[in-house]
Amino acid sequence: MLMKGFTFGYGGRTGDYLKAETYESFDELCKVGINWIALAFDIRIAKSDSLEIRYDFNRDLSDYEIGKMVEIAHARGIKVCLKPMINSKDHTWRAHINFWDDEGAWAKWFYEYTGFMLHYARVAKQTGCEMLCLGCEMLGMEKHEEHWRALIEKVRAEYDGLLTYNTNHGHERDAKWYDAIDVIGTSGYFPVEAEPGADYATMLENWKPVVDELHDISAQWNKPIVFMEAGCRSARGCAMMPWDYMRRDFPADEDEQANFYASLVDAFAGEDWFYGVFWWDWSPKLPDVNRPGYASDFSIYGKKAFDELKKRYEAD
């Protein structure tokens, strides 16, 4: 597996990437055996139909802080995919940013979004990031091929590293411009159990049609595929809906999470078109393992999934 990755730092706010606790958290993450991180952070638009993207000096991470975190990662031999993301203050999922048939609105939006990506392409270039993610789960945007091709051409003029884009699971066939990027990214939240508590063998078997489908897509475009996100909460039933972060009626279950992690790695082992996983996610501050809800959240810190992943990454 080429990219033994993890998403790091999402949720960080102004000043967080300069704190000792962030570096301590990163050191703990490195113990799992990673060789990449997706350094993920968001910029928020006012609402889902906004046509302006604006930096918030009181909230958002500065370019200096991002550069410092990249420097820390590189000092430990970890490669970096810079992953700037768009979120909305009204909590609408970014996939639903959509201006339908209003071509004027789309032109304005892509003007703003291109400026946003060009800024972080320059940051990625200046800090030596090995890969840049052009967007995350922007499903409403994906059909606008000409706009994407123009954006990618401009980004390549500023940045010479790998380019990827993070679609959502099940939508890997939607966009028609993947020839213009280097690595096809998707969120690997594929359900691998039909009822709560499936064992490792069941999940491994249920990954097979996913592997076959993604292999066909990789062959279609002659591009490798990476899971820019993947993971599962340590809650019984979450492998039926690995993307879930809200259901609180599911009881804590470390085995369910560990089986998801182990089966995913093993299902794709030896597939040379599959470039690996950036697991979701590792916080810039180590979690309090005694806080309410920790036992059933996405974190693998101090859980069985950490040991399963470490065992496989050290053996690879």
Image (tube, helix red, strand yellow):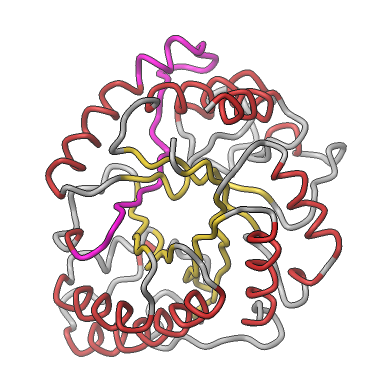
Q: How many marks?
A: 0
Can you say which quadrant of the picture contains the N terminus?
top left
What span is in magenta? 180-206
Q: Position of residue 28 (x, y in %)?
A: 77, 44
Residue 216 vs 283, above or below: the answer is above
Q: Position of residue 310 (x, y in %)?
A: 64, 29
Task: Locate residue 154: give its quadrant.
Answer: bottom left
Which of 82/11 is in front?
Answer: 82
Residue in the picture at 69% in, 23% down: 304
Task: Locate residue 148: give its quadrant.
Answer: bottom left
Determine if the magenta segment contains residue 194.
Answer: yes
Q: Position of residue 60 (x, y in %)?
A: 65, 79
Residue 292 vs 89, above or below: the answer is above
Q: Left or right: where does residue 308 sit relative to residue 151?
A: right
Residue in the picture at 26% in, 62% down: 181
Residue in the picture at 40% in, 18% down: 194
Q: Left or right: where does residue 79 sit relative to residue 114?
A: right
Residue 19 vs 156, above or below: the answer is above
Q: Position of residue 312 (x, y in %)?
A: 56, 25
Q: Left or right: where does residue 129 sit relative to residue 281?
A: left
Which of 207/215 is in front?
Answer: 215
Residue in the picture at 33% in, 44% down: 169
Determine if the magenta segment contains residue 100.
Answer: no
Residue 60 vs 137, above or below: the answer is below
